[in-house]
């Protein structure tokens, strides 16, 4: 048994969807969450910069005596996993592999779509992982830069959202895709709109949910589950204004965020 | 006369619209441009973080022996001007004052709209400056977070852009606003769409153009114009991937960007 907390990293607030799944599937685990809100979004940055920002963030999490790192950010999972595994000797779980596996399990016709930020799509990480698992797969990746601001405006079920989604997803629909990986933490909020574009005929894969399942299995296998019987404690750190994180984050978690602190990590 | 370059700061690439106006109105001036592309966008960050990022950027520009700083970024102009004037003893020109003055000169009914990022609008900088110049003014500020990604997708004249603009600008139209400050470097690209929402009955103020006029007048007054007869040289520095800046920036400037370098400024 291992009662140290799990470290969860995200470029901002979107990773709370992963934290929420972990809390549901592993209620006894303590979690330390770091959101790099001063430098969000990672999705449009170069690989080199994403790696630098992620390693600084992970070094900060390591100061909190964590037993594993979950990379909730799709862009960082796509770009920085290799470097992270080189530098740190605790288990590191990203969202790419669990999301890709679930898509392969879900598809009937081996036609899979991946949607995400420019960084995630251009990195080809989901595409390569899916192809490794299912070499015959036809995979189409589409970057959807307007989806995050639409969700942040609370417009996820609006006419604008539908029009934008129809535009972005046209190619996937034309290619008869039957499963789509929602490769950005914000996108599950758009699932009803995306479902409408496909007239309900598509499997939508949420990597947050799949990742929490993998974290649970990994901790179990390595005998690293917490032995605590009470609900785990969740601590939050951010690199910019904690107040807006607290407000918006409370809505995502459906639970008030109590312990939150702003930290500067650029020197790490 | 003063042949040192003018320093132009922006959080990213949008400030090239200001550089372009400076190059047109002051063709003999050398310019050093810094775009903080590794930490863009500033528009959603806290005041404290914007000030810290801007001061680091300005300190970098100061190492290039500049004679003045032009803050092309609306958010940084709104949030960091006071701190900048405390720390640096060369002239500093932001976009707020020139934009506000032009709106006051343009309005006939003293009803003025200001649109920009959340940071710019919430800072109330344009609103306060306009009120100082025209105390009777009725001013409505609206944050339009979807406008930047729409422009970056190249969708500025699309149905989506019109629908989003109509939604954001409804309140301004209902209040019979006759002049709007385009308070974000990307927004001039949306001028035809915004004009369409107002059936052509609105003055659109471009602070980039107004700021270049103020820079010219200031340099003339202080006898700091360049004495060079040839076209000025423009050097570019960015904090992330120079290649994409070069490509997109070349389109904005209608001129190839030749001299560009990536720099790390976090320690400044």
Image (cartoon, coloured by chain):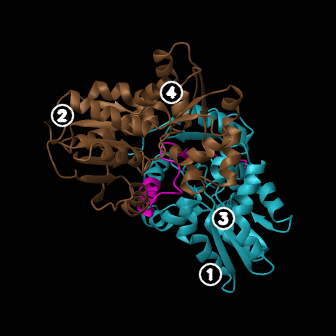
Chain colours: A brown, B cyan
- Report whether residue B162 is seen: yes
**Separation of disc 4 and disc 3 at Cα?**
45 Å
Q: Is residue B40 left or right of residue A67?
A: right
In front here: B178 or B260? B178
Residue B209 placement: quadrant: bottom right
- Disc 1 sits on a residue from what chain? B
Callout 3 crowding tier (Cα within 10 Å): few <14, some 14–19, many ≥20: many
**Going by the image, does B128 lie left or right of A79?**
right
Q: Which residue is tagged 3?
A: B115
Q: Residue at x 43, y 30 (%)?
A: A96
Tell me the CA gap for discs 1 and 3.
Answer: 18 Å
**Residue, disc 4:** A106
Can residue B226 be seen here? The reply is no
Highlighted range, magenta? B26-55
Asked if the residue under mark 2 is in contact with the one under mark 4, i.e. CB atoms within 8 Å, the reply is: no
Sequence-wise first label, 1 or 3: 3
Chain hosting mark 4: A
Whether B30 is among the magenta residues is yes
Determine the image quadrant of residue B169. bottom right
Which mark is first along the chain, 2 or 4?
4
Q: Which residue is mark 2?
A: A224
């Amino acid at each position: 048994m291992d009662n140290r907390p799990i470290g969860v990293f995200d470029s901002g607030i979107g990773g709370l969807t992963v934290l929420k799944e972990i809390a549901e599937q592993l209620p006894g685990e303590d979690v330390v969450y770091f959101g790099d809100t001063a430098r969000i979004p990672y999705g449009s940055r170069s690989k080199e910069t994403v790696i630098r920002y992620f390693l600084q963030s992970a070094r900060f999490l390591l100061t909190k005596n964590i037993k594993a790192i979950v990379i909730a950010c799709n862009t960082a999972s796509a770009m920085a996993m290799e470097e992270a595994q080189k530098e740190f000797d605790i288990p590191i779980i990203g969202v790419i592999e669990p999301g890709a596996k679930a898509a392969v399990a879900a598809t009937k016709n081996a036609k899979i779509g991946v949607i995400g930020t420019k960084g995630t799509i251009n990195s080809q990480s989901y595409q390569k992982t899916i192809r490794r698992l299912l070499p015959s797969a036809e995979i189409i990746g589409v970057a959807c830069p307007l989806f995050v601001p639409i969700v942040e405006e609370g417009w996820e079920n609006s006419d604008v959202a539908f029009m934008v989604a129809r535009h972005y997803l046209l190619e996937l629909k034309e290619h008869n895709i039957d499963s789509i990986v929602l490769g950005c933490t914000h996108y599950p909020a758009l699932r009803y709109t995306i479902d409408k574009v496909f007239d309900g005929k598509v499997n939508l894969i949420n990597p947050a949910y799949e990742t929490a399942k993998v974290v649970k299995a990994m901790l179990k296998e390595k005998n690293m589950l917490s032995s605590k019987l009470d609900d785990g404690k969740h601590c939050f750190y951010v690199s910019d204004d904690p107040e807006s994180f607290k407000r918006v984050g409370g809505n995502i978690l459906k639970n008030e965020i109590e312990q939150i602190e702003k930290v500067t990590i650029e020197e790490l």
